Amino acid sequence: MSRDMMSAFELYQPDTVEGAVELLAKFGEEGWALAGGNDSFDWFKDRVKRPKYVVDLGGIAALKGVRETPDGGVEIGALTSLTEVERSSVIQTRYKVLADAARRVASPQIRNSGSIGGNVCQDARCWYYRYGVNCYRAGGNTCYADTPEGQNREHCLWGADRCVAVSPSDTAPALVALDATMVVVGPGGQREIKAEQFFIGPNVDIERMTVLEDGDVLTAIRLPAEWSGARFYFEKVADRNTWDFPLVNIAAAMKVSGAAGAEKVDSIRIVAGAVQCVPRRLTVVEQVVAGQPKTADTATLAGQSAVRGATPLNFNHFKIPLLQNLVTRAIRDA
Amino acid sequence: MADNTNGRNYPEPRFDSFVSKATSRRTFIKGVIFSGAAASGAGYLLSLGGCSSGGGSAAGVERLLTLNVNGQMRPVDVAPNETLAMTLRYKLSLTGTKLGCDRGECGACTVLIDGVANYSCSTLTHAVRGRAVMTIEGLEGPNGELHKVQQAMIDELGPQCGFCTPGQIMSAVALLNENATPTRDEVRHALSGNLCRCGAYDHYLNAVMRAANNGERVSQA
């Protein structure tokens, strides 16, 4: 397998969203929407994906920047760099969980070029799939990770359906925890999708990780005012502190009332990444914790409830206590 | 720029506004022919099929462009699928920028784009049109004097084999440009996207701390 130069493609650099959508719709399956490129170029250099037409979204000024919206929320352009998200004062002060998540993505240089839209739209990181084998996700009829000897340490605990790949994003769990809305522009116009519905598992479509179809461009991510300034927790566990994808990450947003020492959790959204093909919203934990005192006992119970029903593969049992502990810490320390 | 980079104009070949008003069209194309000749040779030697022969079709981006590299305007013929690292090394002969992994996983190819550290192996050259690229070669002063980070690297015996050093230095320069007095942890964070297989990390940290301290050694304690 050639692993050097990218295959030739025609490059387009539109400067409007409409221009990009028109091109992508025209090119269909032969087209490719390029954001920061950190995911795309791996595919191209390995010659696993060979689009004929690449549409570079990086020159579209309207897709960049963090803006406060009249309804008290914040809108982040999809091509805003992760560094900019991490350093944005409004995100740091009001949606710190997202700034914390962005700071833990990959390396400084990747955060400088990588966009938040690209981070949530990146493809599965299952190394069998990445290697270019003809697995289910690639259109074949085999899963190489879920076999007796398959190396599946990084793979899923829930939602296996032929494919056992996980959501690799650090920012996606934070966005689901914040109940963000994804703004998508396609050939049929603009539509808005809740982050929780934006990500799809193999049971919905095994060849995609998001609802985006050919010609669709994720243009912006809106954070609602509801969770602005809430209590947050984000933690990522990975083999290396730089570059690596999460083994498990956890993002939580909660509203707490009462005096220090006698606090009560009024409401909470808590989401785990890298345990399922989509960011996994831990609704059982939310039900266990909401209305309860924010104590060590509640946190312990939350951790225990988080892992119920987990179905490990041969090499990823460790993710169960890892997730349990992360949930416990999130409730205890947020 | 606005009307001729719009995607809806795709059937027409385009000449973008990067053609300096002071440069006649003829001199511009002449310059490109010269750098293009060097390029095709390099492509042949290195079997850079896609790099030298490109997309073929005239649709899409205009291949002839002028890059702002180290303060100089450099005309160059760039394939649509060409990375900045390829252009710098094999067309502009700026081989101080190293290619380690070519996957954004090592940092040897780090350059500054508009002052920000980026992996040049993971950047399309066409995406830096109109932006300022700074490589390790651009750090020297007007009389060839070393940048303070380079000098500190020598004083602290920073590199071992030296292959990752240009990338480490560019990351350090990007940091010092926005934070002239970083803590050791801030330096560690800024250099965390650069691998060193010799494991000379502490030496690099010492060097950057020294550079930030006017060339005086900073005790680790």
Image (spheres, rainbow, N blue to C red):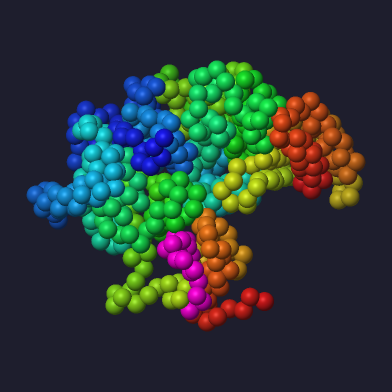
Query: In screen coordinates, is A211 left or right of A256?
Result: left
Query: In screen coordinates, is A21 left or right of A103?
Result: left
Residues B64 and B101: in front is B101
Indicate the quadrant where residue A329 lies: top right
Q: Residue furthest front?
A: A149
Residue at 81% in and 28% down: A308
Residue A144 location, x and y as percent? 59, 26
Indicate the quadrant where residue A247 lies: top right
Residue at 45% in and 76% down: B154
Residue A96 location, x and y as percent? 65, 47
Query: In screen coordinates, is A241 left or right of B61?
Result: right
Q: Residue furthest bottom?
A: B216
Q: How many marks?
A: 0
Magenta-colored stretch includes residue B164: yes
Residue B26 location, x and y as percent? 9, 49
Residues B118 and A49: in front is A49
Indicate the quadrant where residue B68 lies: bottom left
A298 over B72 or under it: above or below:
above
| Residue stretch rendered in magenta on the structure | B155-172
B106 over A187 or under it: above or below:
below
Query: In screen coordinates, is B21 left or right of B164?
Result: left
Residues B136 and A2: in front is A2
Residue A304 location, x and y as percent? 84, 34
B5 over B167 or under it: above or below:
above
Q: Where is the N terminus of chain A found, in terms of image quarters? A: top left
Residue at 44% in and 25% down: A216
Q: Residue furthest left?
A: B26
Q: Can see residue A22?
A: no
